[in-house]
Image: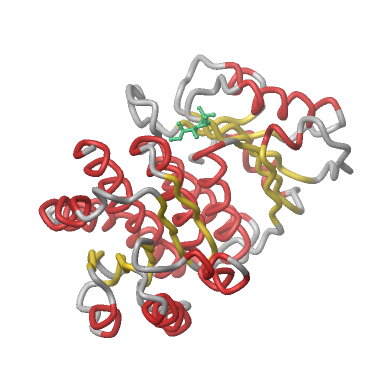
Amino acid sequence: SLFGNKAKDVFKNIDSILILAAGTSYYAGLTAKYWFESIAKIPTAIEISSEYRYRDSVPNLNQLVISISQSGETLDTIEALKHAKKIGHKKTLAICNVQESAIVRASSLVFYTRAGIEIGVASTKAFTTQITVLSLLALHLGMVKGSLSRSEYQKHLAELESIPDKVSEILKQEKLIKEVASSFNETSNCIYLGRGYNFPVALEGALKLKEISYIHAEGYPAAEMKHGPIALIDEQMPVVVIATKKGHYDKVVSNIQEIKSRKGRIIAVVSEGDVRVKELADYCIEVPESLECFTPILTTIPLQLLSYYIAVQR
Ligand code: M6R
């Protein structure tokens, strides 16, 4: 199999998953949590490496511990993995980009993301390959566990195969994204909102803006906005909202209406052909339609580009 022969026996006998990671890799893991539970029906917990390694936790030895790291050398994630092993965990899988790395050496199973050398500090292709690999793992686990039929598996796989062409479509909107970026000249704060599968994308979008554009940004689950952050919204505040069709579309549209009524500037990532959000938003960046669960692989791209162009302009 994709994950090596040893993997099959391990995967068959697990009852849950624990993901350990930091930064962008943590957000990739959070996306995977949604997939592992919705596609493979496996209960999944996720912990920030630097918290997990120091706190008392109760190990479940039937759990698969997945550590996610681009470099394979992030100290907190190495130590979190070592801690997991120390308290009894034996089933360990590394999702890693660098083949000769500490996390790979410390794990019994490995799946490489093969993104090529990460030269920039900001994880971009690393994140995209991590979530792609994790989506494949979710499909594979769904098959092993019998929670996904062969036809559903094939349908999801075919969708994954169509993703590169869809990404190419998104890249054609470079000019529009540059224009959106130029509206950030005076910006010092920004909010990112997403729901469901796109909640981790909002977190990752905000991290990219902080990291490369030096603009303060917060990612939130869209519905949480009303529990505090809404107080920050005024005409100075750009709000980047992921509002693709399906899933929670209607709810996100009503979140957008709330932002509008507070005069927030709305930058929306929408599905191709969207009409409702276009009436409300200042800018709309389109992504081609996809199976709802795989939209994060697409919606991430415009947010990476947006941070990039803002950083260049600044
Ligand atoms: O190499 P890792 O994936 O373990 O690194 C973890 C984080 O330091 C990393 O993802 C960081 O958040 C990124 N540079 C953000 O773009």
Number of on-image labels: 0
The quadrant holding residue 127 is top left
Horizontal arrangement in the rendering, residue 66 relative to residue 300 (left or right): right
Point 30% across, 65% down: residue: 267
Q: Nearer the viewer, residue 159 or 76?
A: 76
Horizontal arrangement in the rendering, residue 11 relative to residue 271 (left or right): right
Q: Does residue 93 lie above or below 254 as drawn? A: above
Point 27% across, 74% down: residue: 281
Image position, residue 102 (x, y; %): 60, 16
Where the C terminus falls, by quadrant?
A: top left
Q: Does residue 234 lie above or below 216 as drawn? A: below
Point 53% across, 47% down: residue: 27
Image position, residue 138 (x, y; %): 54, 54
The quadrant holding residue 79 is top right
Q: Does residue 84 lie above or below 16 as drawn? A: above
Q: Nearer the viewer, residue 258 or 73?
A: 258
Protein image colouring: secondary structure
Image position, residue 148 (x, y; %): 55, 66
Image position, residue 215 (x, y; %): 39, 43
Horizontal arrangement in the rendering, residue 71 relative to residue 304 (left or right): right
